[in-house]
Image (spheres, coloured by chain):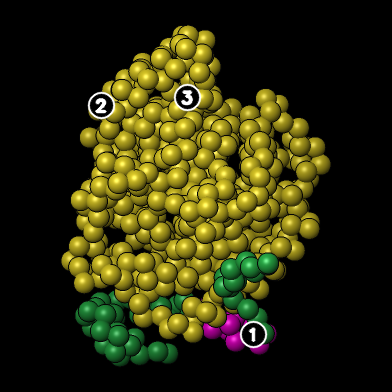
Amino acid sequence: MRNWKTIANGFGTGASGAEVEQIAPALEALEAVLRPAIAALPQGTEPAVVFAPPPEDVR
Amino acid sequence: MTMQEAGRLLRAGKCSSLELTQESLVRIRRLNPKLNAFITVTADSALARARSMDRELAEGRDRGPLHGIPVALKDVFATRGVLTTCGSRIFADHVPDYDAAVVERLDQAGAVVAGKTNMHELAYGITSANPHYGAVRNPWDTDRVAGGSSGGSAVAVAAGMVFMAMGSDTGGSIRIPASFCGVAGLKPTYGRVSRYGVLPLDFSLDHIGPVTRSVRDAALALEAVAGHDPRDPASSRNPVAACVPAGSVGLDGLRVGIEQTDSSPVLQRAAETAGKLGMRLVPVTLPGLEEINAVGRLLLLVEAAAVLESSMARRADFGGDVLALLDQGRLIPATDYVNAQRLRRVLCEQFAAVWRDVDCLFTSATPMPAPKIGQPAVELNGRSVDVRLAATRFTRPFNVLGVPAVSIPWGLSPEGLPLGLQIAGRSFDEAGILAVAAAMEDSAGVDAVRWRE
């Protein structure tokens, strides 16, 4: 489990401790779904959104 | 009356664009104080435009099905010289000096813009209970939400204020209000309609589409606004296919996937009708529904926070729910974002296999009718579920996948509130899903679910 308050302080988000406490359960729930699925990803899986280089300048 | 019917009357000389526009403005004046669907009404420019469109028709210039038709724009579309608030205090005084691509295309198509519609703040939510401009109210029960984020667009169409309204959809923001208000809402394929001039919420999840009173109207609107736009980096070069369904649509043998985890009466009734229409029902379980929803939420949290980071010093200017989401987005590590995009690729590949077995998919658009304004949770299968997660359960996956999906009215709940059926299809197969939707709508009757004063 991540320490969301520390992260919020570190980033200087301006969110108060009470505000972070309020949003932490939603972040935890999201992580609980995603963590196992991400752990099972094959090493070479590329992101869905990838950089596309500019078209080659063929002379 | 649908947009198609209004167009027929217009061309038969039985009414004028000016009369249609005046009637629109009368209804807005009468109903908006109660429903709060509009932030800005552009009455003077609409009347001038209607006169001009009447002159063109009289001179033999017909711009097509939207010529002279009163429409509205969600207040997220940039409009030259007209306030564009995005439903926020952050952009409360924002008057763009250019038009969004969709606004340009509607202009070329001859539409008459009656105004800018109210919405969930910054298009970031599903209720349109806007803290700055007041809650959009559902005409079927004004104590209930209109859905969102394109809530004002759905209400403007449902209440007969305009024939069509444009919306945006990042996790269901066109289809959810369409479902709650008893109108049709179309989210086309990602890249089909230009996002140029629309405030971004999530670069790879944002879609633009129409809300209308019939499926064929949605198809007409899509044909008017779709197409390549070099100003939108994600804009597709795929040619725009004709997608308005014929008068009578035959779909014998078409394979319809019925989502097995969706036990709603909407889906059961839709399956029965599809079977009677000759379609073949194929039970399917959508792969990774929980994961795909979580991926969509994480990407949205992070990208929306990035888009709005420069405004985050103005914390007091955000509504509580939007601020909480923006705070969440700022706390998610970059590694999680990249991994969610990697997982998205895998889920898209898994989902692609579904299209080998079916031609389109049916789910309920929303698993429940419109909740009360301020209601935080709904009961689903004996469990209390956050309203936002419940409403987006079947809509968000199609934003993550980028494939087209349409919501059509499909009966009423026991409380007498509209419910929507969602039909999704393969990339760029808008014509396919609209043909199925039109056949379903024809079988029920286009006026089967219609709000009346």
- The amino acid type, in three-letter code, at marker 2 is Asp
The chain identifier of the residue carrying mark 2 reads: B
In the figure, residue B41 lies in which quadrant?
Answer: top left
Q: Is residue B78 magenta?
A: no
Q: Is residue A33 magenta?
A: yes
Who is closer to the viewer here, B159 or B197?
B197
Task: Pick out the residue farthest to the left.
Answer: B316
Residue B422 shows in the view: no
- Marks 2 and 3, how far apart in space? 18 Å
Residue tagged 3: B67
- Chain for colour green: A
Residue tagged 2: B44
Are callouts 2 and 3 both on one chain?
Answer: yes
- Chain for colour yellow: B
Q: Earlier in the sequence, mark 2 or mark 3?
A: 2
- Identified at 56% across, 33% down, the residue is B220
> Judging from the image, what secondary structure is the residue with disc 2 in?
helix
User: Which is in the foreground here, disc 3 or disc 1?
Assistant: 3
- Identified at 60% across, 61% down, the residue is B401
- Marks 3 and 1, how far apart in space? 54 Å
Left or right: B85, with B365 as reference point:
left
- Read off the magenta span: A32-43
* Quarter the C terminus of chain B occupies: top left
